[in-house]
Image (spheres, grey):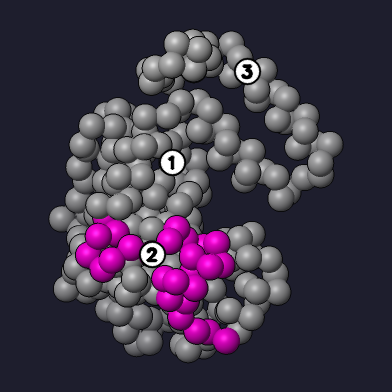
Amino acid sequence: MSLETSLTGRVGTIELNRPDKMNALTVDLVGNLAPAAASLVERGARALVLTGRGPAFCAGADLTLVGQALAGEPAEVLTPLVEGLHGTLKRLRLLPVPLIAAVEGPAVGAGMGLALCADLRILAEGARLVPGYLGIGSSPDGGVSYFLTRMLGSARALSLLLRNRPVRAAEAAALGLAEPPVPDGSALAAAQELAATLAAGPPLALLRVRELVDRASAQGLAEQLDLEQERVAELWKTHDFTEGIRAFLERRAPDFRGE
């Protein structure tokens, strides 16, 4: 299987499982990714972790496909992969639970986009985010231009992409692209620990936080304030809000149910 999933408590883990190919992306792999995530949520996951087996997170497009593209018409070969990947990214961004990327080794091209698509990223010290596009005469895909611009601003995003240089874990953390780096070999465990913390939180409120931050850069202050007011008013009616207040007053841990 090119994709493995597991559920431990309320934390679901999705593992790209093509270590001999540095977890390079195929049409089948990207097509199965969003359904795998949705299945874990249906089984009770309140937070998800995405990682890659072996020494790399994801090397981008499978070189076999790239070779086929060179032998024939590139658009005919590569369009299904890009369309499938972009559809997957859209679905991952709409997940009702947080997604954390655990990155060991390189995340290249579309693999970088896959990591940036997550809500949070934990990089091992030896990990690196590698655009790689200009090196093969291409422009970005996989949402890389979108995510970098939203996270860094247009000037920094443009500099990074035009210079086509890797971003190592420490720099990624300094730029705000990732959490502080962790020792090599421990990114998955660190991501699962963080996911467990998020999974114990109020699911509906977590969803609204993600929505509010996502929409903040696309609208003005007045619209954002109105949206904040709408969302808190909705949450005031939930069990979890009442439970959170009671737990605070009673000095105990809350039992959030997502209702």
Q: Which circle's residue, 1 or 3, is located before the other in the chain? A: 1
Residue at x-position 41% and y-position 46%? 99
Query: What's the residue type where badge 1 is placed?
Result: Pro
Residue located beneath label 2 in the image: 181
Q: Is residue 215 above or below residue 172?
A: above
- Residue 227 at what x, y percent from top left? 72, 30
Nearest the viewer among 125 and 236 is: 125
Q: Residue furthest right?
A: 222
Q: Amino acid at mark 2?
A: Pro
- Magenta highlight range: 163-188
Alpha-carbon span between mark 1 and mark 2: 19 Å
Q: Nearer the viewer, residue 34 or 222?
A: 222
Reply above or below: 64 against 174. below
Q: Secondary structure at mark 1?
A: loop
In the picture of the structure, the residue carrying the numbered disc 1 is 98
Pick the front one: 251 or 50: 251
Pinpoint residue 100: horizontal percent, then vertical percent. Answer: 39, 50
Tell me if label 1 and label 3 are in contact, CB under 8 Å: no
Which secondary structure lies at badge 2? loop
**Disc 2 versus disc 3: distance between alpha carbons?**
37 Å
Quarter of the rendering occupied by the N terminus: bottom left
Residue named by callout 3 = 234
Residue at 59% x, 11% y: name it: 237
Kind of residue at badge 3:
Glu
Residue 253 vertical placement versus 127 (above, below): above
- Left or right: 228 with respect to 240? right
Which sits in the foreground, 94 or 10? 10
Residue at position x 56%, y 67% in the image: 175
Residue 28 in sight? no
Percent position (x, y) of residue 75?
A: 47, 75
